């Protein structure tokens, strides 16, 4: 069974962490992943940096720009991750925009992911129709779960469609906002969390965007299976060494 | 069905589509479902055409350029989009989109701008309609284009600097898209060119198609034929070219020439000739030709004209290039500036530097004396005076 699905069966709320590969330093990738696992994180999203990350706010735009300046490339990321499964057991996903993946070659990209032991992909700007008609068979062939997003504006009809083509978890965007722009959840978001929970979807949901501390993690996982922290972790890395990662995680869980 | 019209899924051949994050889906989908029927409503058409006539000043003349024709030994006509209100074709589109925004019940308008022409055209129609207007503009462009920033402010728009990435048009577009993600219900995004996710490229092309509609009927009156031998237009994102080509796309005996900015030369490393230097990729929600690194990072193009330095090109143009329906020619800064000055001297018209690129083709291509050549004079050069002054040391 795919490591993601296995993890989702555990009887606990899951903490997933996003970081941008190549930030703060180009060769930090493996040590960040290892520190995160050691700290008790359940799942990791490795961000493949892109020059124009449309769905992200200033924090991830900046970490991506710096990562690219540092010399991070798709090829280099794969080289860094070659032996990652010797030490790391938790599910690993790559989150990236579609253009760099297209340029690498979608088939080749998926093949590499599978060889390394990547379990899933999150590609915010790959539309569902395009995925189903062009790429689904490639993802399946290489044992990769494709994770789709829903937002507070996504219609129930579309949520049902997304649920039916997903077979790991649904990435639930907490708010109509880019990443890293929220501080705390209001009534509206809490109602949305509850509303989605009441749909009884077959795929568990993991909430992203707007989670930065113990309080927001708790709110986000009241009705959902887990939550993802991205921008807040990137900000932490800006000011703290990798060895300090356990401090950040202990502050959340 | 024309092979050059957009498919139901938003593609021109292999280019186009809507490669957008889910956060944008409801907005783009709302527009996709409704734009055709709203545009087709007779009340919409009436209001749109009335504003184009009374406010923009259409139809713009199709002017026979006698001295230019003598010099290049062909019958050269200029489609005078420079005479539109605000000084360029951009307003044809912003009028159309703001009427659409109003019918969708939107109260807040956002736009991106590079040189500021689309920003001014958007601020203008927002003032006209009494809607709140926010224009995103790269921090570097704000410094370079101070007069247009002042114009937008005078027209009541808020100009927000894009401080991410390379701080130019592509980043201003990113910021506008992010604003739309953050404001999904009350906001309408007026895109300035035939770029972005479907239905924008088709919608903008339709609003600009008034240019070629008029060319057809004016040419019929003046020359007794609806069909020129060539239509020439400059291409950045490609909205004026899309408008000038639109009604001729299926008339394959009409040669279409799209003129890109070669900057310091196509091979100089400082160029914006996307059809030569671009590879297929995704930019701003559209699959199209795109200037990028081997690793898929979008690169910053260069041209002396701020309106042509977009790293992508509209998917319609990528398709026209792919199937050979349009001939793409790249013109350097030097040749464009020379051609711009020549139009000043021969015809008494100061063209925008973008448009000057189109004129430079006259010197590159051999025409027959009986050829009817229509050049889309997309904008006037007032905004470029500083660049002209610095270049020629006037």
Image (cartoon, coloured by chain):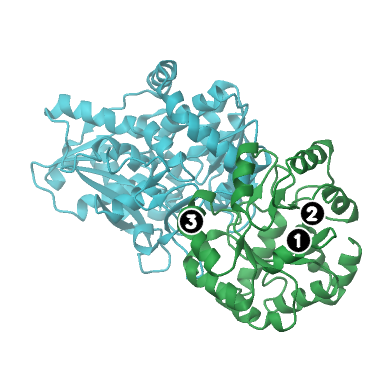
- Report the residue marked by disc 1: A8
Identify the element where label 3 is drawn: strand
**Image point (52%, 68%), residue name:** A141
Q: Earlier in the sequence, mark 2 or mark 1?
A: 1
C-alpha separation, residue under disc 1 versus residue under disc 3: 33 Å
**Image point (42%, 35%), residue name:** B203
Whether tag 1 and tag 3 are in contact, CB under 8 A, the answer is: no
Give the green chain's letter. Answer: A
Note whether A249 is above or below B232 in the view shown.
below
Whether tag 2 and tag 1 are in contact, CB under 8 A, the answer is: yes
- Residue B330: give x, y in percent of width and height: 31, 57
Query: Residues at marks 2 and 3, common chain?
Result: no
Whether tag 2 and tag 3 are in contact, CB under 8 A, the answer is: no
Image mark count = 3
- Residue A123: give x, y in percent of width and height: 59, 58
- Residue A75: give x, y in percent of width and height: 55, 76
Give the cyan chain's letter. Answer: B
Q: Residues within 10 Å of mark 3 (few under 14, many from 20)?
A: many
- Report the residue marked by disc 3: B282
* B200 or B130, nearer to the observer: B200
- Report the residue marked by disc 2: A225
Identify the element where label 2 is drawn: loop
**Image point (40%, 55%), residue name:** B391
Quarter that holds the N terminus of chain B: top left
Chain to which mark 1 belongs:
A
* A108 or B357, nearer to the observer: A108
């Amino acid at each position: 069974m795919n490591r993601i699905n296995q993890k989702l069966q555990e009887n606990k709320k899951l903490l997933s962490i996003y970081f941008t590969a190549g930030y703060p330093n180009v060769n930090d990738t493996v040590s960040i992943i290892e520190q995160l696992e050691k700290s008790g994180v359940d799942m990791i999203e490795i961000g493949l940096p892109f020059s124009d990350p449309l769905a992200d706010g200033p924090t991830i735009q900046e970490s991506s720009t710096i990562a690219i300046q540092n010399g991070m490339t798709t090829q280099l990321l794969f080289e860094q991750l070659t032996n990652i499964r010797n030490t790391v057991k938790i599910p690993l996903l790559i989150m990236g925009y579609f253009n760099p993946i297209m340029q690498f070659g979608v088939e080749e990209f998926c093949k590499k992911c599978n060889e390394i032991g990547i379990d899933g992909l999150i590609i915010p700007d790959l539309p569902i129709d395009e995925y189903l008609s062009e790429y689904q068979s490639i993802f399946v062939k290489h044992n990769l779960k494709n994770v789709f997003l829903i937002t507070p504006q996504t219609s129930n009809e579309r949520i049902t469609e997304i649920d039916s083509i997903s077979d790991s978890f649904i990435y639930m965007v907490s708010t109509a906002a880019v990443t890293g722009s929220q501080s705390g959840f209001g009534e509206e978001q809490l109602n949305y969390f509850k509303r989605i929970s009441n749909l009884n979807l077959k795929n568990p949901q993991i909430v992203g965007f707007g989670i930065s501390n113990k309080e927001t993690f708790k709110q986000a996982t009241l009705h959902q299976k887990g939550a993802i922290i991205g921008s807040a972790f990137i900000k932490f890395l800006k000011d703290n060494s990798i060895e300090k990662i356990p401090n950040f995680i202990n502050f959340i869980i | 069905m024309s092979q050059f019209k957009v498919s139901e899924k938003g593609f021109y051949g292999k280019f186009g589509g809507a490669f957008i994050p889910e956060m944008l889906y409801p907005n783009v989908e709302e527009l996709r479902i409704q734009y055709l029927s709203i545009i087709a409503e007779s009340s919409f058409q009436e209001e749109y055409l009335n504003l184009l006539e009374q406010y923009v000043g259409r139809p713009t003349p199709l002017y026979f350029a006698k001295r230019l024709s003598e010099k290049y030994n062909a019958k050269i006509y200029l489609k005078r989009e420079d005479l539109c209100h605000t000084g360029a074709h951009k307003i044809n589109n912003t009028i159309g989109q703001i009427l659409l925004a109003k019918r969708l019940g939107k109260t807040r308008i956002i736009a991106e701008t590079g040189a500021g022409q689309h920003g001014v055209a958007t601020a203008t129609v927002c003032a006209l309609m009494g809607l709140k207007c926010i224009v995103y503009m790269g921090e570097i462009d704000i410094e370079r284009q101070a007069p247009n920033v002042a114009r937008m402010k005078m027209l009541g728009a808020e100009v927000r600097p894009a401080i991410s990435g390379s701080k130019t048009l592509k980043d201003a577009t990113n910021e506008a898209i992010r604003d739309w993600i953050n404001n999904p219900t009350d906001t309408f995004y007026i895109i300035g060119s035939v770029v972005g996710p479907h239905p924008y490229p088709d919608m903008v092309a339709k609003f600009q198609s008034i240019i070629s509609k008029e060319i057809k009927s004016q040419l019929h009156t003046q020359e007794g034929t609806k069909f020129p031998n060539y239509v020439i237009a400059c291409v950045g994102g490609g909205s004026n070219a899309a408008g000038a080509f639109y009604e001729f796309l299926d008339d394959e005996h009409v040669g279409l020439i799209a003129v890109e900015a070669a900057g310091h030369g196509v091979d100089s490393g400082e160029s914006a000739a996307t059809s030569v230097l671009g590879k297929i990729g995704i930019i701003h929600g559209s699959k199209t030709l795109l200037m990028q690194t081997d690793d898929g990072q979008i690169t910053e193009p260069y041209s002396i004209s701020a309106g042509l330095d977009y790293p992508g090109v509209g998917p319609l143009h990528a398709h026209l290039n792919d199937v050979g329906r349009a001939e793409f020619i790249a013109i350097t800064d030097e040749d464009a500036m020379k051609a711009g000055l020549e139009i000043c001297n021969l015809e008494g018209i100061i063209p925008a530097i973008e448009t000057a690129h189109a004129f430079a083709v006259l010197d590159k291509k051999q025409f027959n004396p009986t050829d009817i050549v229509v050049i889309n004079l997309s904008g006037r050069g007032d905004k470029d005076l500083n660049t002209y002054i610095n270049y020629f040391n006037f």
